[in-house]
Image (cartoon, rainbow, N blue to C red):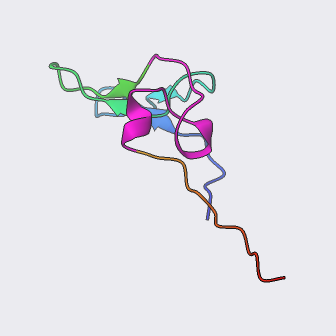
Amino acid sequence: MMSKQPRQFGVWAGDPDGRAERLADCREEVFPAHGIHYQCCRKRGHGLNGWFCKQHAKRHPAKIVAEDRTQ
C-alpha cells in the first residue's frame, strides 16, 4: 500500500523534518562520508516506474509483466 505522505530525505535528530522528495530527481537515498543521507540529484527516467537515474536503476530494475496469451 502506498503512503500518502511524501518521502523525506536527510531526517536526523538535528533536522527531524528532513527535506521533501524532489519529484524530478532520482528517488535513491545516497549516504556520503558525513553520514546524513540525501536524495540523489540525477534525473529520473529509468528502472522501476521510472523513479531512478540510470546508475541506481541497476538496483531497482523495471518489473516486466508477462502478457497472458491463452487465447
**Residue 70 in the image, given as x and y percentages of width and height:** 77, 83
Locate residue 25 relative to residue 70 in the image: left or right.
left
Instruction: Answer above or below: position of 48 versus 67.
Output: above
Residue 5 x/y as whole percent: 62, 46
Residue stretch rendered in magenta on the structure: 41-59
In this view of the protein, which residue sits in the foreground, 10 or 42? 42
Is residue 3 visible to us here?
Answer: yes
Which image quarter: residue 43?
top right
Residue 16 visible in the displayed image: no
Quarter of the rendering containing residue 40: top left
Q: Is residue 71 left or right of residue 13?
A: right
Residue for point 39% across, 27% down? 55
Given residues 61 and 30, the one toward you in this image is: 61
Q: Position of residue 25 (x, y in %)?
A: 55, 22
Query: Quick one: which residue is furthest to the bottom in this view?
Result: 70
Q: Quadrant of the N terminus?
A: bottom right
Q: Quadrant of the image for the C terminus?
A: bottom right
Residue 69 horizontal side relative to residue 58, left or right: right
Residue at x 62% of width, y 44% of height = 49
Judged by its main secondary structure, the magenta piece is loop
Q: Is residue 42 magenta?
A: yes
- Give the mark count: 0
Query: Is 55 rendered above or below residue 48?
Result: above
Rendered location of residue 50, percent (x, y) = 60, 37
